[in-house]
C-alpha cells in the first residue's frame, strides 16, 4: 500500500468560516503563502455560499481569482448549490467540493434544503461538473453524528455515498463534522466503503472536538485511506453545527504522518510559521498539540543553555 498521503488544507474555508473577525483577502493569501512554503499542495481555498449565511466567505470570487497558480497547488472551492457552482467555475475553479449532511435537520440548518432535496441538488451539480470537465468532491457531513439528531446509522452514509458516486463524484470525503466519532465507527465506515469502491476514491475529514482526530485518522489509514483534510492551527468549526470545534490541526496530522514513515511532502517547522501567520490574521491563539510541545522543548533547551552559561 502506498506510503504517500495527501494532506488537504481546509483552514481557509472550514477554518475561517466560523471566525467572527473578517480576515481580508490579503490576510488569507498570507496564510496560504505560509502553507505553500511548508509544502502544502492541496487546498480548499474558499466557499461560494451565500454571503448572508457566511460573511467570511463573501470575498470568494476575489480570493479565488488571486490564488497563486504557478506553485503546483491544487485548489478546490466548496459550493452548496448550482449558483455556487457557477460562481466557482467563473472564478476559475477546476475542483469543487459539495456538501451533503447525513441528516434531515443539518441539511435544513446548513443549506436550507431537505435531505432528499440536498441529495438531488448535489447529484445535479456533480453531473453538470462532470459534463463540464470539473472535478467533484462530495462531503458526507455529520457522517457519524449530528448536533441536532444525534447518532447516524452507517447505512445512511453508505447509501448517500453510493448516490454521490453513481452520479459521478470523483471522491467522497467522510466528515465527522462535530468530532463525535470513535475509531471503531470510522474503521467500520471506511473498511466497508473501501471494500466496495477502493480506498483511492475516499478521504477523511475529522474535527478534534474530543481529541480523537489523530486516532480517527489512524483508523482510516489502516483501511487504506490516503487523503485527509486538516486545518492550520486547528482552526475551524461549522457555524450551523453547534458543538463543532476546530478541524484536526494540520501540524499534528503532518507530525504524526512524518513520524510514522508516511510521505506528505510537508514540514512541521514550516507549518509552525503558518500557524503564526494564522494567529496574526485571526487575532487568536492557535496551534495543535505539537506546537505546544515544540514550544516547551525550546523553553527547556533555552533554560538549560542559560544555566550552563552561568
Ligand atoms: N452564493 C451566493 N449567493 C447565493 C448562493 C450562492 N451559492 N445561493 C443562493 N444565493 C442567494 C440568492 O441569489 C438569493 O439572493 P437574493 O436574496 O439577493 O435574491 C439568496 O441567496 C437566497 O437564495 P435561496 O436559493 O432562497 O437560498 P437560501 O436562503 O435558501 O439559502 C444557501 C441557501 C445554500 C444559499 C445558504 O443556506 C448557504 O449559503 N449555505 C451555506 C452554509 C455554509 O457555508 N455552511 C458551511 C459549509 S458546509
Ligand atoms: Zn468540517
Image (tube, rainbow, N blue to C red):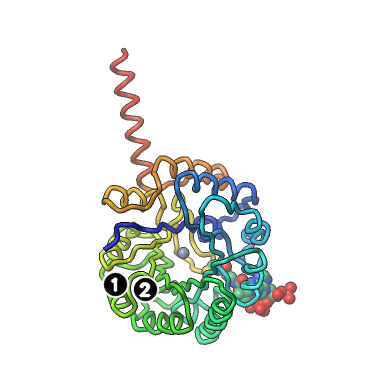
Which residue in the structure is indicated by mark 2?
A: 144
Secondary structure under tag 1 reads helix
Which residue occupies 38% across, 79% down? 157
For this view, does 175 lie left or right of residue 74?
Answer: left
The quarter of the picture where the C terminus appears is top left
Please, is residue 33 above or below residue 200 in the view? above
N-terminal of the pair, mark 1 or mark 2, is 2
Query: Would you say the residues marked 1 and 2 are in contact, meaning their CB atoms lie under 8 Å apart?
Result: yes
Q: Which mark is residue 185?
A: 1
Secondary structure under tag 2 reads loop
For this view, does 192 lie left or right of residue 126?
Answer: left
Total labels drawn: 2
Please, is residue 285 above or below residue 65 in the view? above
The x, y position of residue 47, in whole percent, is 58, 64
The residue carrying mark 2 has its beta carbon less than 8 Å from ligand 2: no
Which residue occupies 46% across, 72% down? 139
Which residue occupies 65% across, 73% down? 86
Q: Which mark is residue 245?
A: none
Q: Closest to the observer: 176 or 83?
A: 83
Q: Closest to the observer: 83 or 194?
A: 194
The quarter of the picture where the N terminus appears is bottom left
**Marks 1/2: CA distance?**
7 Å
Q: Residues within 10 Å of mark 1 (few under 14, many from 20)?
A: some
Q: Closest to the observer: 303 or 99?
A: 99
The x, y position of residue 81, in whole percent, is 60, 76
The x, y position of residue 125, in whole percent, is 57, 79
For this view, does 70 lie left or right of residue 197?
Answer: right
The x, y position of residue 119, in whole percent, is 51, 83
Amino acid at each position: 500500500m502506498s506510503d504517500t498521503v495527501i494532506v488537504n488544507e481546509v483552514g481557509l474555508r472550514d477554518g475561517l468560516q466560523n471566525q467572527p473577525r473578517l480576515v481580508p483577502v490579503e490576510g488569507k493569501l498570507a496564510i496560504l503563502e505560509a502553507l505553500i512554503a511548508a509544502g502544502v499542495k492541496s487546498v480548499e481555498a474558499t466557499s461560494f455560499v451565500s454571503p448572508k449565511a457566511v460573511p467570511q466567505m463573501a470575498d470568494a470570487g476575489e480570493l479565488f481569482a488571486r490564488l497563486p497558480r504557478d506553485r503546483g497547488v491544487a485548489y478546490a472551492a466548496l459550493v452548496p448549490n448550482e449558483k455556487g457552482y457557477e460562481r466557482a467555475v467563473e472564478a476559475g475553479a477546476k475542483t469543487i467540493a459539495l456538501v451533503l449532511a447525513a441528516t434531515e435537520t443539518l441539511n435544513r440548518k446548513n443549506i436550507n434544503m431537505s435531505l432528499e432535496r440536498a441529495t438531488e441538488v448535489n447529484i445535479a451539480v456533480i453531473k453538470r461538473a462532470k459534463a463540464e470537465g470539473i472535478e467533484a468532491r462530495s462531503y458526507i457531513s455529520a457522517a457519524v453524528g449530528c448536533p441536532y439528531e444525534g447518532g447516524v446509522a452507517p447505512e445512511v452514509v453508505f447509501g448517500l455515498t453510493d448516490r454521490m458516486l453513481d452520479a459521478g463524484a470523483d471522491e467522497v470525503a467522510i466528515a465527522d463534522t462535530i468530532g463525535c466519532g470513535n475509531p471503531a465507527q470510522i474503521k467500520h465506515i471506511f473498511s466497508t466503503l473501501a471494500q466496495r469502491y477502493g480506498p483511492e476514491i475516499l478521504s477523511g475529514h475529522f474535527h478534534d472536538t474530543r481529541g480523537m482526530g489523530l486516532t480517527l485518522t489512524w483508523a482510516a489509514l489502516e483501511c487504506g485511506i490516503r487523503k485527509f483534510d486538516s486545518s492550520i492551527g486547528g482552526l475551524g468549526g461549522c457555524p450551523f453545527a453547534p458543538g463543532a470545534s476546530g478541524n484536526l490541526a494540520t501540524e499534528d496530522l503532518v507530525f504524526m504522518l512524518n513520524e510514522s514513515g508516511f510521505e506528505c511532502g510537508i514540514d512541521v517547522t514550516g507549518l509552525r510559521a503558518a500557524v503564526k501567520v494564522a494567529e496574526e490574521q485571526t487575532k487568536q491563539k492557535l496551534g495543535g498539540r505539537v506546537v505546544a510541545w515544540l514550544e516547551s522543548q525550546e523553553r527547556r533547551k533555552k533554560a538549560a543553555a542559560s544555566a550552563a552559561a552561568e
